[in-house]
Image (cartoon, rainbow, N blue to C red):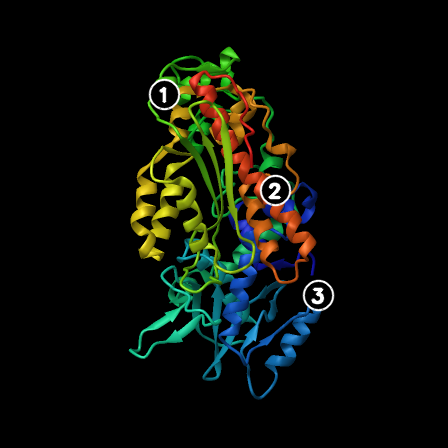
Amino acid sequence: MKNDLSKSKLMAFLQCPRRLYLQVHEREHAELSGEDDPRISEGKRVGEVARSLHPDGVLVEDESLSGALKTTRALLSGNNPRVLFEPAIEHDGVCVRADMLVPAKGRFDLIEVKSATAVKEHYYTDVAIQAFVLERAGLGLRRLTLQHINKDFVYPGGGRYHEVKRNGTINSLFVECDVTKEANSLMRSVSRWARDARKTLNGKLPPRTSHCADPVPCEFLAHCYPEETKYPISCLPRIKETEIAALARRGYQDIRDIPSGVLRNATQEWVRAVTVRGRADLRSGAREALSLLPYPRYYFDFETINFAVPIWKGTRPYQQIPFQWSCHIEQQSGTTTHEAFLDIAGEDPSRALAKALLAVLKRRGPILVYNKAFESRVLDDLAVRFPDLSERLQAVRARLVDLLPIARKHYYHPAMRGSWSIKAVLPTIGSGLDYGDLCEVQDGGAAQTAYLESIAGETTRKRKQVLKNALLEYCKLDTLGMVALARFLEGKRKGDIQGRT
């Protein structure tokens, strides 16, 4: 049938008809995540664990749609129905592949597995589309269920992701929510959605909408909203979509178009004024704020990994587990040294990491970080997990000094385009430091990907060493950049900030 639809295509249509049209007719404009994206890998892992809880189930592995449909029909025609994973069902040109179909007294329970930690509104639509196709194809459904991650689950080890304790309590990776009522109320609309989606595909390119990130980020955002100016209004810090639209209606496209007095937010007005002048602004006060800090000064940064499916005993889903840190130590003379920790052995690195940082950070001296809230959470978590280290870890936490709000309050350059991330700031201060010079790892997402590959059993020793070196260089640049920024804000010369490793 022309313009065959799937659940994902209908969901794209409901978010924005233009998104569906582009997915089918102009796919080349999409900015897609790679297969090594940690989020994709984690989603697959969640599905694998969910299936493992039904050891007698059968996975429909056919990659082709026709093959999957044929295999599913054969499995459903048997006298002894089995739990089916990824079965393909089609009705009137709409095809879905359910996560699970579980036999239930002559009917089936439909289970949709999500890697989120709570039920989101658009999940009801997701289930409704599947239920509509399944029922119209002749399958009786008893219950519609969403199975999502239980954020309170603590992994006991040994591959046990669902266990009933002796006292009768259940410790499971998943929470099941019955969404039969919510999904059934939406099912009557599916036929209309499919009809309207086909009409969209057979017509002209639909207009743009404002649903670019609702409910999920659209892969065509850059195509639909290309930056036609050097400093688009969207670069104003913390500006809402409604505010962007209001300014656009008044004819403003570039920050430099906006007259003085239009923006009520003080930070946005500052960014506007600096952008109009075309040169950086370093306000007074930064030097004074930093000059109060004694020496030695420690510039510190964590790298963490957060598994949807915990792999280490005693950890929780999406817990930020540190596997690496970097620390530059600056003396009053201006000399710096560098210390680092990275464990790619594959076991939980947390305790060794915590002990190593305590040894390096000593008991006095400010610890400068870039986004104190993050480092504080990691330290708090380590303190809870290791009570014998708790007092010293909390003492470290009390010494944290956040460089980010100092930079945000006192410095702005038009080239930062509304961002005070360390990567945005460094190129504007003449530091000579550039993340683009790094090879394999240039941002936090790439660091997570590199770490996952480095601890994988199939990764060769040679490849592990390459990844280890890349991770060390990346994290080192984070703290080296903080040294450069602090010196810039204090008005000091760059000096020898390379130090020794």
Which class describes the residues within 10 Å of circle 1: few (<14), some (14-19), or many (20+)? few
Question: What is the three-letter code of the residue carrying label 3?
Answer: Ser
Three-letter code, disc 1:
Ser
| Left or right: 293, with 256 as reference point | left
35 in relation to 276, above or below:
below
Q: Residues within 10 Å of mark 2 (few under 14, many from 20)?
A: many
Badge number at residue 220: none
Q: Residue at x 56, y 58 (%)?
A: 345
- Quarter of image, res 376: top left
Residue 481 point in image, percent of width and height? 51, 30
The foreground one among 262 and 489 is: 489
* Cα distance between the residues tagged 2 and 3: 35 Å
Q: Amino acid at mark 2?
A: Val
Cα distance in 3D space between marks 1 and 3: 65 Å
Q: What whole-number distance in Å separates the C-alpha atoms at marks 2 and 1?
A: 33 Å
Looking at the image, is mark 2 or mark 1 nearer the viewer?
Answer: 1
> Residue 276, image x and y in percent?
50, 13
Q: Residues within 10 Å of mark 3 (few under 14, many from 20)?
A: few
Q: Residue at x 69, y 57 (%)?
A: 2
Q: Could you say which quadrant of the image residue 371 lies in?
A: top left
Task: Answer whether labels 1 and 3 touch (C-beta < 8 Å).
Answer: no
Residue under label 3 = 64
Helix or strand or loop: what does disc 3 sit on? loop
Mark earlier in primary sequence (1, 3): 3
Circle on res. 291: 1
Q: Which residue is mark 2?
A: 441
User: Where residue 366 sits: x, y (%)?
Assistant: 36, 32
Asked if residue 401 is positioned above or below residue 134 in the image, the reply reads above
Residue 52 shows up from this direction:
yes
